[in-house]
Image (cartoon, coloured by chain):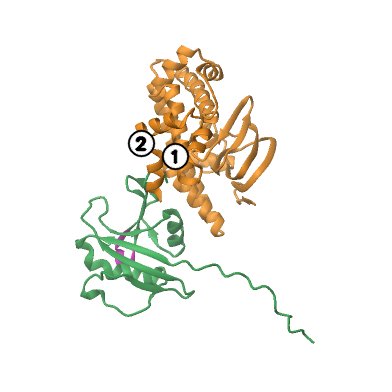
Chain colours: A orange, B green
Amino acid sequence: MKYLRVLKNNNQISSETVKQAYYPEHISNFSMKMVFSGNSTYNIGKRHLNLYPDSFLALNQGTTYSSKVDSNIPVNTLSISFAPEFLSDFYRTQFKNINALLDDPFNHTDHSESYFLETIYPFSGDMKYNILHLKNQIEQNSPDDLLVNEYLHHCLINYFKVYHKEVSNKSENLSFLNKSTKIEILKRLTFAKEYISSNYNKNIDLQDIAQTACLSVNHLLRTFKQAYGLSPHQYLIKVRIDRSKYLLRNTRYTINEIVEIVGFECPSSFIRLFKAINTITPGKYRLNLQ
Amino acid sequence: MVSQDHNNRIKPIKPERRPITLRLSYVQDFVPHLADALDFVIEKLHFIPTEKFYLSDGPKNEPIELSDCNGNLLTLIMKQIEYNPEFNYIIFHTDDCLRDYHKYTHAGVEFTSRPEYTDAGLRVDFLGNKENRYTLLEERIYTDI
């Protein structure tokens, strides 16, 4: 099942539910990718990202990437591609003063600030509400361009909020004076974070993470904690617990199956950690949702 | 001769009509304006009450049933809330603020702002009939949606 909608202003929304699909390398506009069940894989240069329902991927304009779905269960994906003019206009209306907008209303050449850290971000809060509403509209009705563009405008508002929280605020936590050093460190930490998030169910160790981030193990440990308030290992546990919660909420997998899927060694350590973080056992958590 | 089966095509599936519920919240001070709010629903959103009632006797506790010309049913629930300085108008609750903002705009409703994010959720204020002010509010819970 596939849905594709190209708006008059060249914004584009596509959605599909498949078990197997492969899209060879192509160049993107600024785009956001989400999955609502299962996971999909994105290859961006040497980076291999696995996207799960708790995250969304933001790709910059001009990025070359390929993507793949290979799953036993149907994977429902949604992709939003923003026309450069729409993005540029959004940026100008948000950040330029009113006089500049009145003097030069159709200037779409100002892309200087529209480059973002290209990675996976938490899919939650207003961003999730907005995307779910948009998804609901395109599945249930035939919304006109104006309404779809309203949702897309709010996608960008929400993305800027997430970006500010996940990138700008986190870089402030790093104790370096030099702004460019902060940005470079944060970029490498982002690679570490997305490596953990993409491989959370595998037996990964600090060496692997440090190598992916091009940081020494000690440097990684120090700066990761500074930026995110968690050690890489604590972050890995958090990702595993969050994904186990998703599986408890949305699937009928047994606790033992979930333990295996999310990469814990044994049920007892999973239950202990789950209870320590959520003050409730996984079984009771699931029971409370019924 | 036209066969009996000539017009026996598969009939298009009618989309299922989902009942709509519109919840209004108000504080004591706005009781006099409730009739205006109902007039607004009737005039702008084109719903008609299915039975007669009088708001002049005071706000009704039970839901009010309305319907439009397409047979869509709307249940209007009015609820009194405690005074909140953030929401000093009658609140129209919605499950999708942008959808209804778009729908109301098409119906000619005059909005006094663009939808904005608040601690309570996404909201936008608009003018009703007789210059009354209302708030369209989508309450949001930010844990595990």
Measured as percent of width and height from the top left, residue A250 is found at 48, 46
Q: In the drawing, does residue A94 fall left or right of residue B118?
A: right
Q: Are the residues flagged by discs 1 and 2 in contact, CB closer than 8 Å?
A: yes
Q: Tell which of A254 and A165 is nearer to you.
A: A254
Question: Could you tell me the amino acid type at mark 2?
Answer: Asn
Q: Tell which of A77 and A202 is nearer to you.
A: A202
Same chain, labels 1 and 2: yes
Q: Secondary structure at mark 1?
A: helix
Instruction: Name which quarter of the figure residue A30 lies in.
Output: top right
Subunit under mark 1: A
Tell whether position A257 is magenta: no
Measured as percent of width and height from the top left, residue A37 is found at 55, 44
Q: Secondary structure at mark 2?
A: helix
**Residue under numbered circle 1:** A245
Question: Could you tell me the amino acid type at mark 1?
Answer: Lys
**Residue at the spot x=63%, y=30% of the render?**
A43
Query: Tag 2 or tag 1, which sits nearer the N-term?
Result: 1
Tell whether position B131 is magenta: yes
**Magenta region, residue range:** B128-134
Q: Is residue B22 above or below residue B65?
A: above
One can see residue B117 in this view: yes
Q: Is residue A68 above or below residue A211?
A: below
Measured as percent of width and height from the top left, residue A136 is found at 51, 54
Most distant residue in the right direction: B1
**Residue under numbered circle 2:** A278
Which corner quadrant holds the N terminus of chain B?
bottom right
Number of numbered labels in the structure image: 2
**Residue at the spot x=40%, y=15% of the render?**
A176
- In three-dimensional space, the C-alpha distance between marks 1 and 2, rounded to whole angstroms, equals 10 Å
